[in-house]
Amino acid sequence: MRVAYWPGCVSRGFTPELHGSMAAVAPLLDIELVELDRASCCGAGVIADHNQELADTLNARTFALAQAVEGADLMMNICSTCQGAQGECQERLDANADYRAQVNETLREAEGLTYEAGLTNKNFLWLLVEEIGLERLSGMVRRPLTNLRVGPFYGCYIVRPTDRLGIDAEHPRDQYLHWVIEALGGTVIDYAGTHKCCGFPVITMNKEASLKQAGTHLADATDAEADCLVVPCPLCHLNLDLQQPLAAKVVNRELAMPVLHLPQLVGLALGLEPKQLGMGKHVVKPTSVIDWTTSVVGAPALA
């Protein structure tokens, strides 16, 4: 499968282990990544709050670059915040031909690009389930995540609004993380925060509230005896992993919860080593929950 690949700006800056692990996992899944290295930030919804047409033009440019990739089946992202922000822009562009023409005029004058309505843009999570398929994914597993108790953390941008994100009875995308964990041989751990916001969107306005949200989710997962969390969004990863020591102080709890990027979890099951997946870059090291002396993933080592 050939995809026009939009890694987003966070995965190439704050979380390079996400970008790197996706590159390592793709060949094992028979995915050819054609990186849209000229694309700009999606705006994360912030730009649209100040200048909607600017945000839509920037994203239309990314969509046009994706459509220019010869032989690409679709556009793929690894950031659910990008999925949400780009989905909102695409909804506006596809619904209004006059507005789309206005945006395209800017693109043509600046770079000779044009966005045609109807681009398919999918987060890596959606692609795993809908394009590769759970049965095929399960058949690719070389190191089943036996005994690994994984808490799914969807965040907010990839589960709502449901209409825009195509979540319905036929496509229950708000359950896909659960399904992927099981397909990889892991045990799904449900807890209160699976579909709630990580708190990142408010961190610059109310840091304590943001850290309290993150700390509460991490504490709930700890109480549910999860070994780790897995996220499809690097911004969620920043708040749950990078900010975890501060979040622990806010909620007055000892927290030591590893937070894996989705490609890392997939990579482990497909046989890649932690070093290949950049697991040494995390604040809470994911290798603390893995017994690499066997092919079985184990519980956290006792101190």
Image (tube, grey):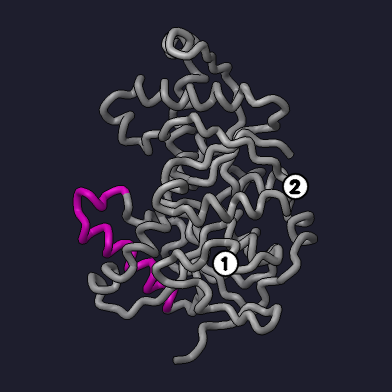
Circle number at residue 35: none
Relative placement, left or right, of 29 versus 283 is: right
Q: Is residue 196 above or below residue 101?
A: below
Nearer the observer, 43 or 167: 43
Q: Give the magenta part as a residue range.
A: 201-222
Question: Element at badge 1?
Answer: helix
The residue shown at (44%, 52%) is 234
- Pick whichever of labels 2 and 1 is earlier in the sequence: 2
Relative placement, left or right, of 66 versus 254 is: right
Identify the amino acid type marked 1. Answer: Lys
Q: Is residue 25 above or below residue 170?
A: below
Residue 62: give x, y in percent of width and height.
Answer: 50, 27
Identify the amino acid type marked 2. Answer: Asp
Residue 9: give x, y in percent of width and height.
Answer: 43, 41
Residue 173: within the magenta? no
Residue that numbered label 2 is attached to: 30
The quadrant in which residue 197 appears is bottom left
Q: Is residue 161 visible?
A: no
Distance in Å between CA atoms under marks 2 and 1: 21 Å
The residue shown at (63%, 78%) is 297
Question: Element at badge 2?
Answer: loop
The residue shown at (49%, 46%) is 79
Q: Main secondary structure of the magenta part?
A: helix
Nearer the observer, 155 or 290: 290
Residue that numbered label 1 is attached to: 275
Count neighbours of disc 1 (C-alpha within 10 A) and say few if under 14, some if 14 to 19, many if 20 or more. few
Nearer the observer, 127 or 269: 269
Instruction: Tell which residue pokes out farthest to the bottom in this image.
Output: 303
The residue shown at (45%, 64%) is 281
Relative placement, left or right, of 303 versus 203 is: right
Q: Is residue 7 visible?
A: yes
